[in-house]
Amino acid sequence: MLMIILLFLLGENRTTVPFSPTLPHLQEKTQQREECEPEEGLSYRGTLSVTVSGDQCLPWASEKARQLSYKKDFLEEVPLVENYCRNPDHDEDGVWCYVDHPNMTYNYCNLNYCE
């Protein structure tokens, strides 16, 4: 019996379990990379409001956005809320928004799309 106790105390009777640290911030980043928007973001309802070039999106209800949207065929099921990036015309390049920029009227937003 003494021999068993000594072996146990010396670590001879241990089970090895691999250590796998779970860091919350790394886990969140991995989940974010894995999540993707289907159909070029057609059903995207998030709050992203900055373009790939860093420009702030204009509110969809602003005078400039309304003028630029005049006679556009936007899908009714895509809510144009606040200044959030959307894909109201089923653009094959994804979600976008109007911007107040001297060289462009709109720009795309950075989302991870499903292939």
Image (cartoon, rainbow, N blue to C red):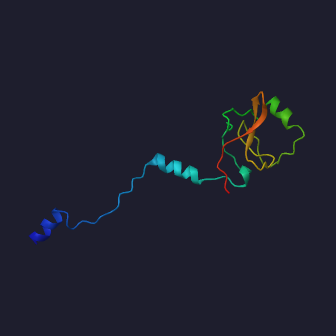
Q: Residue at x 69, y 46 (%)?
A: 45
Q: Residue furthest bottom?
A: 1
Q: Residue at x 11, y 70 (%)?
A: 3
Give the side of residue 1 with respect to residue 40, left or right. Answer: left
| Tally of marks | 0
**Could you tell me residue 51's position as x and y percent?**
69, 37
**Could you tell me residue 105's position as x and y percent?**
79, 33
Q: Residue at x 9, y 69 (%)?
A: 2
Q: Residue at x 64, y 53 (%)?
A: 36
Q: Residue furthest right?
A: 71
- Residue 43 to residue 83: above or below: below
Q: Quadrant of residue 64?
A: top right
Q: Quadrant of the C terminus?
A: bottom right
Q: Quadrant of the N terminus?
A: bottom left
Q: Quadrant of residue 57?
A: top right
Q: Nearer the viewer, residue 58 or 114?
A: 114
Give the side of residue 40 with respect to residue 74, left or right. Answer: left
**Could you tell me residue 28's position as x and y percent?**
51, 48
Q: Quadrant of residue 60?
A: top right
**Could you tell me residue 110's position as x and y percent?**
66, 43
- Residue 65 to residue 46: above or below: above
Q: Residue furthest left?
A: 2
Q: Nearer the viewer, residue 23 or 75?
A: 23
Give the side of residue 25 with respect to residue 92, left or right. Answer: left
Q: Residue furthest top?
A: 102
